[in-house]
Image (cartoon, grey):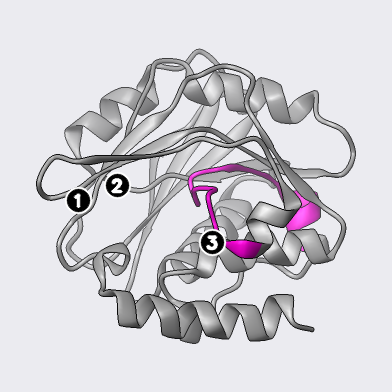
């Protein structure tokens, strides 16, 4: 189900929040999204699909109802962003080189026991080929996204679908760029979330990604 949460007169980017059926957007997420100055539109798509599929469906419905905007960002329903983080991401991507397909920021996972895991690295091709350190909550140039054939949506890679997308971008000559500021977001590692599955599941998915996106 498609829903418009915010419509601006002159949006510079569109936010898509994909939801599993029954999921709600956390209050802290709503507050942090609104603490930005750049005009943007915000939509959700709720359905029995994986996250990239719901994101693509949200974009499709948005384009049909309004018009295509060059920049988009998928925002999860449970993250808390620093003030003006989206402003920084937008200003970074519109001033980026022609080979930059997306921009990203530092982020921190908060585990069940309160332990924090920070991911904060400049873009490095070799590091990306080894493992993912870039969040799916990154701002994307849709021209590049369409050129490479869109998101990776195959359930065989679920848990690492964002890594697949960044590797797909890399294959087509597009890189990411970290924002210049230290603004970031935090997200809890929720039990039952795909990111919280065990190590054996991770190894299986990682082997598939390596075989299909790196060793080709």
Kindly identify the residue that appears in the image at 56 percent across and 43 percent down.
138
Residue 21 is situated, as x and y percent measured from the top left of the image, at 23, 68
Kindly identify the residue that appears in the image at 56 percent across and 85 percent down.
208
Is tag 3's residue or tag 1's residue first in the polypeptide sequence? 1
Q: Mark 2: give few (<14), some (14-19) or many (20+) Cα within 10 Å.
A: many
Work out whether 175 lies above or below 208: above
Residue that badge 1 annotates = 24
Callout 2–callout 1 Cβ contact below 8 Å: yes
Residue that badge 2 annotates = 77
- Say which quarter of the image contains residue 164: bottom right
Residue at disc 2, secondary structure: loop
3D distance between C-alphas at marks 2 and 1: 7 Å
Residue that badge 3 annotates = 162
Residue 209 is situated, as x and y percent measured from the top left of the image, at 59, 78
Residue 51 is situated, as x and y percent measured from the top left of the image, at 42, 65
Query: Is residue 155 visible in this depiction of the protein?
Result: no
- Closest to the observer, 31 or 97: 97
């Amino acid at each position: 189900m498609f829903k418009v949460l915010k419509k601006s007169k002159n949006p510079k980017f569109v936010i898509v929040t994909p939801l599993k059926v029954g999921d709600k957007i956390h209050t802290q997420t709503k507050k942090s999204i609104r603490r930005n100055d750049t005009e943007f539109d915000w939509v959700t798509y709720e359905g029995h699909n994986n996250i990239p599929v719901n994101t693509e469906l949200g974009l499709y419905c948005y384009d049909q109802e309004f018009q295509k905007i060059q920049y988009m960002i998928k925002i999860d329903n449970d993250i808390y962003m620093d003030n003006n983080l989206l402003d920084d991401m937008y200003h970074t991507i519109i001033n980026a080189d022609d080979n930059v397909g997306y921009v990203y920021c530092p982020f921190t996972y908060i585990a069940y026991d309160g332990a924090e895991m920070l991911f904060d690295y400049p873009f490095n091709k070799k590091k990306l080929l080894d493992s993912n350190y870039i969040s799916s909550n990154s701002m994307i140039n849709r021209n590049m996204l369409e050129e490479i054939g869109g998101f990776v949506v195959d359930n065989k890679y679920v848990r690492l679908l964002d890594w697949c997308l960044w590797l797909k971008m890399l294959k087509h000559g597009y890189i990411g760029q970290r924002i210049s500021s230290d603004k970031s977001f935090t997200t809890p590692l929720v039990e039952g979330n795909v990111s919280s599955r065990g190590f054996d599941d991770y190894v299986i998915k990682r082997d598939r990604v390596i075989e299909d996106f790196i060793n080709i």
